[in-house]
Image (cartoon, helix red, strand yellow):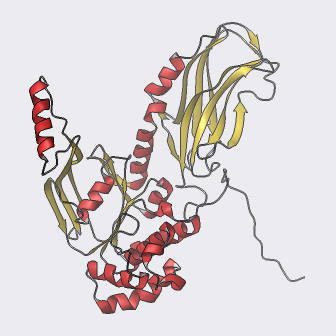
Amino acid sequence: MSIPIIRISHLSKNYRIGALQPRYRTLRETITSVGKNLFSVNRKSEDTRLWALDDVSCEIHPGEVVGLIGRNGAGKSTLLKLLSHITSPSCGRIELNGRIGSLLEVGTGFHPELTGHENIYLNGAILGMKRAEIRKKFDEIVSFAELEQFVDTPVKFYSSGMYMRLAFAVAAHLETEILLVDEVLAVGDVEFQKKCMGKMGDVAREGRTILFVSHNMTAITNLCHRAILLKQGKVEFDGDVVIGVRKYLNDVNQDLLGEDARRKISNLPEDPILKLLSFRVSQPGRINSSFLSSQDIEISIEYTVNQRINGLRVGFDLITQENGAVVFRTFYDDADSSKRETTPGAYISTAVIPANLLAPKTYIASLAIGIHNIRWIIYEQIALPVTVMNIGGVNANYADVRPGMIMPHIHWTTVEKGEE
């Protein structure tokens, strides 16, 4: 096996939070402090320590493309800053066997008074590149950033988008062995984000090592083969990217799937006709919240009916999380629910959303139970997340994000037209 290009051993980083004392204090501040201490009883220190990283260990080998994922505050950016020598660890060890290019914040390392042209050379020098290497890549960097017209303008006049384009172009084109990319691509427009993803794919195919932080799980699964999931500063998972992404998404949605959903169900007002027992999203045999596009999705509703009723409608709306657009509404026995009679008893109604139907994004399944043309019993009070990842289904082999809410398998035929 090759020598790791990055070896992280028992790495920890803590920050002091709370009321920090200044290094030097005025006479007034000193007297005030003494007075407070005299008249306070059992006063606890306001200073606390936050462990942003706690005993993290891993090895990354040359050519690996690793997605660093986790909730906000999990320690992802802290880890990249430690690798970039922006800050130092509290304890532990980092071994690097290659030059690092990092894109952690928009315009990091740029001098505002220098032009784009000068900053390209400055950044290259900081990264340890020789002037001849920078000159060789200069035109390609400017062209990629689409800043030919502004390359001789001081960067203090650049917009945030122009900053980001130039910063990414420099980091991606200068030939460092390791590229660290934090969640900065969100600044750019959609077309440039696609361009950046394509470039990172090219960088990966060149055999360079990439650590990529993003909350865009489609980008992570398309680009990376390995995921490191951080949770509260610790490594929760390190392995196959599909498994890692699913663990992350399930963790993000666990409140809705678990205690929060049960609490909301238990707090529903009592209805003499029906009592909701559970509402869950699963793949066959297992409760889940994230699915491969090639998997069926089961949505189950368990309830008891307390009296004989005509026209009971049990179903849900599927809406997009990003803008609340309704994808579809469905009910059990849509065809003749207005005539169907339901007798008292316990029921489970299960809908199966077929594989290769939904486009990759996060949806919300919003419960809808009512009596046909009379009233809603439950509507919009209970909702669950459904995240679809573009793996194993339509368009899975392409990096582009296909527009639309659905992405079904459409049957096509192509025949060679003979001479007429």
Q: With respect to residue 315, does 14 lie above or below?
A: below
Front-most of 310 and 400?
400
Q: Answer with the quarter of the image where residue 141 lies.
A: bottom left
Could you tell me which residue is drawn at 49 percent across and 72 percent down? 162
Label tally: 0
> Residue lying furthest front in this view?
28
Image quarter (top left, top right, bottom left or bottom right) of the C terminus: bottom right
Front-most of 410 and 278?
278
Q: With respect to residue 334, does 253 lie above or below?
A: below
Query: Could one spot residue 161 in this view of the protein?
Result: yes
Q: Answer with the quarter of the image where residue 342 lies.
A: top right
Point out residue 204 in the picture as x, y percentages from the top left corner. 40, 72
Point out residue 394 in the picture as x, y percentages from the top left corner. 61, 58
**Position of 93 compared to 216: left or right?**
left
Q: Answer with the quarter of the image where residue 259 lies.
A: top left
Query: Could one spot residue 201 in this view of the protein?
Result: no
Could you tell me which residue is drawn at 81 percent across and 25 percent down? 336
Front-most of 58 and 337?
58
Point out residue 85 in the picture as x, y percentages from the top left corner. 22, 65
Could you tell me which residue is drawn at 60 percent across and 10 percent down? 270
Q: With respect to residue 28, does 258 lie above or below?
A: above
Could you tell me which residue is drawn at 32 percent across and 47 percent down? 74
**Position of 99 compared to 417: left or right?**
left
Point out residue 5 in the picture as x, y percentages from the top left corner. 23, 69
Image quarter (top left, top right, bottom left or bottom right) of the N terminus: bottom left
